[in-house]
Amino acid sequence: MHQAPHLPRIRECYPDLDINQLQLDADGLVNQVLIINNERVFRFPKDDQARAALRRETAVLKIVHRHVSMAVPHFDRIEEDFVSYPLIPGRALMYQDLFNLSGLELDRIAEQIAIFLQQLHGVPVVEIEAAGIGASISCHSSDDWQKLYQAVEQELFPVMPTHIRHWVEYWFSPYHENPSWMENPRKVLVNGDLGPYHILYDDVRHTINGIIDFGTAGLGDPAVDFAVLLYNFGEAFLKRIHHTYPLGEDVLDRARFWAGTVELQWALAGIRTRDCSWFLGHLGSARDIKPVGTPW
């Protein structure tokens, strides 16, 4: 315990806190996360960019609390170098969890996520803009998609089997036929990274306890949130969400396209950084993403 990073700082700010248990979460890309006594979370940003993101997230959560019924982090201590909040219990919702649930339990979880997204996407844009919260960092412009394809061509095609190159060309064909197709004029507040590790699952009651981490939140295309869910949990689960929060065909197809590019983006990051962990980030995902234009 004494070797844990930031522990002296925590003791300084919480001199009366009796630390009986400490857990260090090493998975965070931008924050070091400590959980004390399985009751309180401390997030320490790793660099200046992470500190700026945490300030932005603080502003986002103040607004989210007014509009969303799902439990989300409540930063009750905000310092220059960390934030702290009461732990929301639960563990990551995994794809394999879905296979152990009844149809009614699946519908209940899908409904919880759908209502959360409806409320999040329904936050008045004027409130977001008034708080100085701009675009989500998960957003991509038409030029971004073109740059992604060019990077894949230049950096990944030389090491790809022929049939995978053909798949990439096929997947990008709707974009190449109409480069403005992925542009969405309707901007809403998106989470931007609604992966399994940010959805806290109660594996006894089979419900969602809360959603954590709004570090990528901001204005953007609602398709990005559905894309992350689609990539991690598949079409069948997304269709259950659709029953409560209907996806238009345009949103669904943008989500499909987006989800289909995730592994290309991870692969580029892995090659550029020479860090093999980037190639492991997609293991265990659903992978049942239907082609653009496929009707439900």
Image (spheres, helix red, strand yellow):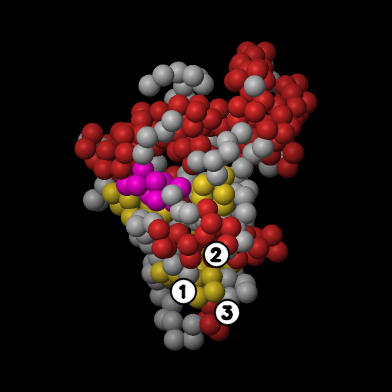
Q: Which residue is mark 2?
A: 59
Q: Is residue 293 above or below residue 225?
A: above
Report the magenta residues as a range. 112-121
Q: Which residue is mark 3?
A: 8
Per the model, the C-alpha gap separating discs 3 and 2 is: 27 Å
Q: Earlier in the sequence, mark 1 or mark 3?
A: 3
Q: Is residue 115 magenta?
A: yes
* Spot occupied by residue 242 in the image (x, y as percentages of width and height): 36, 34
Residue 145 in view = yes
Determine crowd level at label 2: few under 14, some 14-19, many 20+ residues with C-alpha closer than 10 A. Answer: some
Q: Marks 2 and 1: which is nearer the front?
A: 2
Q: Marks 1 and 3: which is nearer the front?
A: 1
- In the rendered structure, which amino acid carries the disc numbered 3? Pro
* Spot occupied by residue 87 in the image (x, y as percentages of width and height): 40, 65
- In the rendered structure, which amino acid carries the disc numbered 2? Ala
Q: Is residue 174 above or below residue 5?
A: above
Q: Which residue is mark 1?
A: 76
- In the rendered structure, which amino acid carries the disc numbered 1? Asp
Question: Which structural element holds mark 1?
Answer: loop
Identity of the residue drawn at 52% across and 53% down: 125
Residue 232 in view = no
Q: Are marks 1 and 3 in contact (CB under 8 Å)?
A: no
Question: Which structural element holds mark 3?
Answer: helix
Which image quadrant is residue 55 in? bottom right
Per the model, the C-alpha gap separating discs 1 and 3 is: 19 Å
